[in-house]
Amino acid sequence: MSIPVVDFGAYGLSGRDVADEQLHNLGEELKAAFTDVGFVYLKNTGITDDEVDRVMDVSENFFMQPDDAKRPFSRGSFAGSANHGWVSLETERLNPRRPGDLKEAFNAVSLRPDIKWPSSDFQEIQTSFFLRCKELSLRVLRVMAHSLGLDPGVFLSAHREIGTDENGTTLRSLYYPPVNRKKAKEGQLRCGEHSDYGSITLLFQRSEGLQVRRRSGEFMCAPCVPGTVLINIADLMQRWTSDQLVSVVRLRLFSADFELSSINRSTGFCCPLLGTPAHVSPWLSLPSPMMWL
């Protein structure tokens, strides 16, 4: 089964509201995709290719600097925002049984005015794109709630602190530097097997190699589809919906024996939730009362 493409134009960022029938139709399409596959490509979201290119270009310019220039912006260097900042090559291993992932990252988490950024252009472009992704995410969450027969605001209320230190939602720019695959460590990948832990993730791809796991257990390619954003369900959303919507394991392979840096980049917008116990219980009837105990 391939990942479906859904036209989100009826509720894209260029419009203010959506008719009930359009909301219903969008909801049915998203629910089918998130139930069967856990992923969907959205087109006509209102986020343009130019916006995506700008955030990827400014991120790549940062990544191309020497490590000594990037180190002052390392993750863990910002008081009150532990996940904000640069992550160096091989620091993360999303599958702990594998060597460190062959990627760098910059996490934009907090939009506090006192947070230090690599440059004013970097801050402006990252912040603008963060807010655009936030708006799109809230629209997607509203459609999802409608499709599940929930109050349209039920997911929105759990994401109300996006962009503050009270919420871990992250705009995550990833860079896959040139590497000779034959010189990689045994079992080493661009990004190890993992699922996301929050509600939903928006992924803007400019490189191949992403693989997602089918319900059968086999992996399939999730290629770059021009003009789309790839959205997936994360673990807490699966829990909230009592496994009706599925959080799928994925990984990123090498796309060639030797990869060029100019094409190996992506940007993700990952939406964790407010970290309070009140937001952990499923909202739908559980198929088994013991499932989440």
Image (cartoon, rainbow, N blue to C red):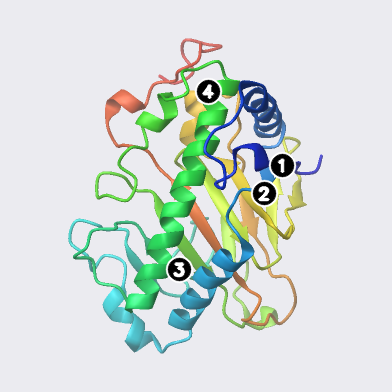
Q: Up-down: is 71 above or below 3?
A: below
Q: Earlier in the sequence, mark 3 or mark 4?
A: 3
Q: Residue at x 23, y 66 (%)?
A: 115
Q: Which residue is mark 3?
A: 105
Query: Decide: marks 2, 1 in contact (CB < 8 A)?
Result: yes
Q: Earlier in the sequence, mark 2 or mark 4?
A: 2
Q: Up-down: is 283 above or below 128?
A: above
Q: Up-down: is 98 above or below 176?
A: above
Helix, strand or loop for disc 1: strand
Q: Earlier in the sequence, mark 1 or mark 3?
A: 1
Q: Earlier in the sequence, mark 2 or mark 1?
A: 1
Locate the N terminus and report the quarter of the image it occupies: top right
Q: Is residue 117 left or right of residue 156?
A: left
**Pick the front one: 229 or 207:** 229
Q: Residues within 10 Å of mark 2 (few under 14, many from 20)?
A: some
Q: Amino acid at mark 3?
A: Ala
The answer for how far apart the CA atoms under marks 2 and 1 are is 6 Å
Q: Which residue is mark 4?
A: 241
Q: Earlier in the sequence, mark 3 or mark 2?
A: 2
The answer for how far apart the CA atoms under marks 3 and 2 are is 27 Å
Q: Residues within 10 Å of mark 1 (few under 14, many from 20)?
A: some
The answer for how far apart the CA atoms under marks 2 and 4 are is 27 Å
Query: Decide: marks 1, 3 in contact (CB < 8 A)?
Result: no
Q: Up-down: is 165 above or below 280?
A: below
